Amino acid sequence: AQSVAQPEDQVNVAEGNPLTVKCTYSVSGNPYLFWYVQYPNRGLQFLLKYITGDNLVKGSYGFEAEFNKSQTSFHLKKPSALVSDSALYFCAVRGNFNKFYFGSGTKLNVKP
Amino acid sequence: NAGVMQNPRHLVRRRGQEARLRCSPMKGHSHVYWYRQLPEEGLKFMVYLQKENIIDESGMPKERFSAEFPKEGPSILRIQQVVRGDSAAYFCASSLEDRGIQETQYFGPGTRLLVL
C-alpha cells in the first residue's frame, strides 16, 4: 500500500530553535517526495522535493529535508524557527500512476 | 506565469442546489487534480484528469459528483443536489508531465463551499 504518515498532529517550538516535522512513507519503487505548507485560508505552497541525488534537499524559506531510504523517512527541518513559520505542513509522495498521497498534516506552532 | 486559478473563492449554496467549481491550471500544465479538505483535516484525493480524460476518479463519490477537463477552458468540479456534508474547501492542483511522470503539483487558492 502506498501512503504517507505524519505522526505528530502538532509541533511546538520556540523562535530561534531548530525544528523538525516528521514524515514517513510507503511506496513501491523510487519515491518522489514533497513538502508543502498551508497558511490559514490559503492553498498549499510547494516547499521542496526529493526526486533523486543528494539526500539533503534545500527548499524555500530556509527549509530543508533529509531523505533516509533505510528508515523510509523524509523529515522537514529548519535550523532556526521563525514565528512566521507557524502553519500547517503536509508531506506527500507520488505513487503509482501519478497519484499523489498526502499526510494528514502537522500544525507547527512557533512561539516568540 | 500565472499560478493555478480557482473560482469562485467562496460559494454559498442551499441544500439541493448545484455547485460548480472551476480550475484553470498553470500555463502548459495538462494535468489537474482535485482534493477536498475538511476543517482541521488533511487533503482527500478526489479525481485526476488529463485534457478530455479522467485518469483516476477513485476518490470521488459515485453519486452527485462529476468532473471534467475539456480541451478548451477550465476544469470543472460539479456537485449536484448539495448537502451540508459537502461543505469543505476544494483545492485544485496542476502538474507538468515529463516523460510520463507527474512531478510537482502546484495548488490553487481553493474554493470554500458552504451549504446552508
Image: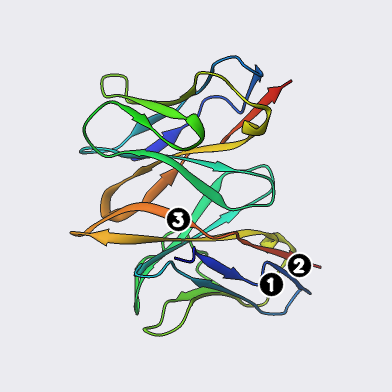
Q: Is residue A87 left or right of residue B101?
A: right
Name which residue type carries label 3.
Answer: Tyr
Identify the residue at the far bottom of this view: B72
| Residue where numbered disc 3 is placed | B106
Residue under label 2, please give it.
B115
**Quadrant where the N terminus of chain B lies?**
bottom left
Q: Quadrant of residue B42?
A: top right
Judge whether B33 appears above or below A38 on screen: below
Residue picked out by circle 1: B82
SS at mark 2 in the image: strand
Please state the horizontal and vertical placement of residue B38, each as a whole percent of the image.
Answer: 65, 51
Q: Are marks 2 and 3 on the same chain?
A: yes
x, y (%) of residue B98?
A: 23, 58
User: Which numbered disc, 2 or 3, marks the residue that appears first in the sequence?
Assistant: 3
Relative to B111, say whether A37 is above or below. above
Viewer-nearest of discs 2 and 3: 3
- Percent position (x, y) of residue B22? 56, 74
Marked residue chain, label 1? B
Which quadrant: the C terminus of chain B? bottom right
* Inter-mark Cα distance, 1 to 3: 27 Å
Tell me the kind of residue under disc 2: Val
